[in-house]
Amino acid sequence: MRYEIHGTFMQSLDTFLAPNESMYTESGGMAWMKGNVEMTTNTRGGLMAGLGRKLAGESLFMTTYTNRGAEEALVTFTPEAPGKVIPIKLNQGQSIICQRDAFMCAEVTVDIAMHFRKRLGAGFFGGEGFILQKITGPGYAFLEIPGEVREYSLASGEMMNIDPGHIAFFEPSVDYDITRVKGLTNVLFSGEGLFLATLMGPGRIWLESLPLANLAAKLSKYMPTKSS
């Protein structure tokens, strides 16, 4: 499959579909298209699979775009917030664990499913890290990550403490847990809340600079309020 990513902080993704080649995305994910492209919308895998994706931040229904023409077709996708479009090429059975709502689009050979954290600590206190997405190959998947993205490689046993909202995605070999912030003053005045996420290697992790919850909280200060 051929693709191009355009822009810097408000990126768009052009996918060029050969005859009979397909891409799928959540409902409303397509921006524009050109050529003899057929749209098919369904729950993709059944109702339970659709409900699982819904819990993981995606839509219940997915739309597949297939080139039914004899020439190459264009389908363009755009993210929902300022940030980066990240291409991930997955081999057969290879997976990546992502934050909720990170999935943008993928080849039809790629599977997306809900991913639960096994530990109760991460479940109850991890906030954005409670329910994640598991994307499995083979094929190309494209993620939409708010802000800029930085990649780190953690050695076996190496650990990094992270505000949960800054975790974009990581390899399944990385262990994810939640730890409590130490010190009453830190809890009350640091602005980091009660808990931090911990990612421990081995494996690669990708972190984002602009969690949408932080952006929404900042913008809410400037939004007009209803007068009493």
Image: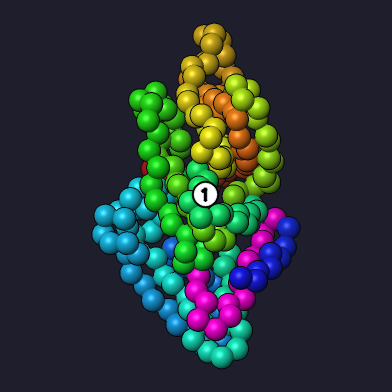
The quadrant of the picture occupied by the C terminus is top left
Q: Is mark 1 on a helix, strand or loop?
A: loop
71 is higher (above) or lower (below) than 225: below
Q: What residue type is labelled 1?
A: Gln
Q: Position of residue 162 (x, y in %)?
A: 58, 28
Question: Does the magenta portion include 18?
Answer: yes
**Residue nearer the viewer, 218 or 129:** 129
The quadrant of the picture occupied by the N terminus is bottom right
Q: Give the range drawn in magenta.
A: 9-23
Q: Residue furthest right?
A: 8
Q: Position of residue 211 (x, y in %)?
A: 57, 41
Question: Does residue 93 appear left or right of residue 211 in this picture?
Answer: left
Q: Which residue is drawn at 68% across and 40% down?
A: 151
187 is higher (above) or lower (below) than 163: above
Residue at image mark 1: 94
**Residue nearer the viewer, 2 or 24:** 2
Question: Does the magenta portion include 175?
Answer: no
Q: Which residue is drawn at 55% across and 83% down?
A: 19
| Res 3 → quadrant | bottom right
